[in-house]
Image (cartoon, rainbow, N blue to C red):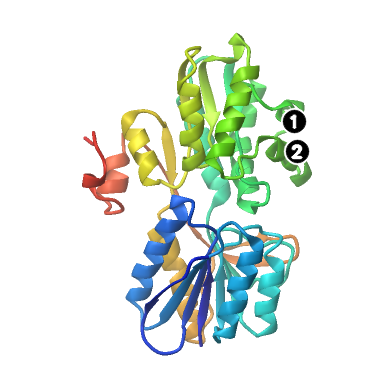
Amino acid sequence: MFVLIVAGCSSSTGGSGDLSVGIVLPTKDEQRWVQDEERFKEAIGESDYSAEILFSQGSSAKEKENVNTLISKGIDVLIITPVDGDSAGGAVEAAKDEDITVISYDRLITNTDAVDYYVTFDSVAVGAAQAQYLVDHSEGSGIPLYLYAGAATDNNAFLFFEGAWNVLQPKIADGTFVIANSSEAETLQDKAELTREEMSKIVSQLTTGWDPAEAKNKAETHLTAAGDDMKGDIAILGPNDDTARAIADVFSGDSAITSYVISGQDATKASIQYIIDGKQSMTVFKDVRTLVKDAMDMALTILDGDTPETTGTYDNGSIEVPAKQSDVISVDKDNVKAEIVDSGYYEASEFTGLE
C-alpha cells in the first residue's frame, strides 16, 4: 500500500521503490509549513517507505493538480492539509474514487464524506490558551481588546476563535475587556455561545487570511480609527505567530499604546525571538514533531492493513470524522527555554538574549 500526504514545490525522501507516502502542504510562504516539511522528512527517513512532498502555494487549483499527480503515481493513502477546507472536497473525492484512504492533516476538509481520518491539535484548546493568557496578564477593567482572526476559508480559524470567545466573552460581559475593533463582535458580546453563522460575521470582519501584510493593514486601520480611550494598556488576540508579529510591530509604533499583551501560535523561530525580546507575549506551542508522528503512525498503520487509533471526532458538515488529537502548550518568556530549547525543538544558538 501507499500513502499520500498533501502540501506545492516537490521533494522526495525515504526508501527506494514505488512511492509510499505523498505529502501536500498548503504553502511554503509560512514558516510553519516549512517546519512541517522538515519534520516529515525526518520521520519518513526513519521509515521503510518513500515519500514525495508537494506544496500548493495557497492555490486550490494547484492543490488539486498535486493530488492528481500523486494519484497517478499509485498512492493508497492521502494525507492533505487543505488550502481551503471546502474547495479541497473535489480533490479528495477524486482520491476516494480510486479507493485511496484520505487523512486530513492539521486543517479539516469540510462538507464531504471523502475524509477517513483527521490528525490535529485541539484547535479549540489553542484559542482558549491564547485568550486565557490575555486574561491572566491584563490588569484592571475597561481594557481595550483588539480581536483578529485567521483565514475565513480555514475551519481551524473558527475553532481557534470559538476557543478564544469561550474565555473572553465572560470577561467582556463583566467589563474587564472592551471590544475595540469589531462592530460584529460588539453586537454579539452578550452571547456566550455563537453559532457558526455568528462567528462567520466576526471572523469575516477580522480575518487576516493568515497573511502578515493583511494583518499589518488591518492593525493600522484599527489604530487610525481608535480614540484615546481605546489605547493605553491593551490586549490583542493575535491569530498566529506571523500575523502577531506584524500586528505587534504596528501597535508598538504608536506612542499612545503604553503596553500590550498579544497572543500567537506555532512557535516559529522568528516569534520565539520576539518573545525573548519582549515584542510578543506568548505563543501556543504545537509540537509539530508530535503531529507528524501521529500522522505517520496513522499512515503506517493503514499501510500495514490495520485500523489507526483515534481519540475523538470532528463534524465536517457532512460526516463525523475520526480524529487523533495532540496536546498544546502555552509558551512565554518564563518557560521558552525549557519548552522550546531544552526539549530539542530548536537550538539555543538560533536565538540571541536567551537566558
Along the viewing direction, whichever of 167 and 215 lies nearer the viewer: 215
Q: Amino acid at mark 1?
A: Glu
Q: Quadrant of residue 57?
A: bottom right
Numbered mark located on residue 268 in the image: none
In terms of secondary structure, where does tag 1 sit?
Answer: helix
Mark 1 burial class by Cα count in 10 Å: few <14, some 14-19, many 20+ = some
Look at mark 1 in the image and give the residue it sits on.
Answer: 184
Q: From mark 2 to mark 1, how far is it between C-alphas?
A: 6 Å
Look at mark 2 in the image and give the residue it sits on.
Answer: 201
Instruction: Tell me if 13 is positioned left or right of 221 in this view.
Output: left
Instruction: Tell me if 274 is positioned left or right of 60 in this view.
Output: left
Q: Amino acid at mark 2?
A: Lys
Q: Are marks 2 and 1 in contact (CB under 8 Å)?
A: yes
Location of residue 91 in the rendering, given as x and y in whole percent from the top left corner: 67, 71
Q: Which quarter of the rendered picture does the C terminus lie within?
A: top left
Instruction: Tell me if 355 is positioned left or right of 209 in this view.
Output: left
Q: Is residue 333 visible?
A: no
In terms of secondary structure, where does tag 2 sit?
Answer: helix
Location of residue 99 in the rendering, given as x and y in whole percent from the top left corner: 65, 85
Q: Is residue 30 visible?
A: yes
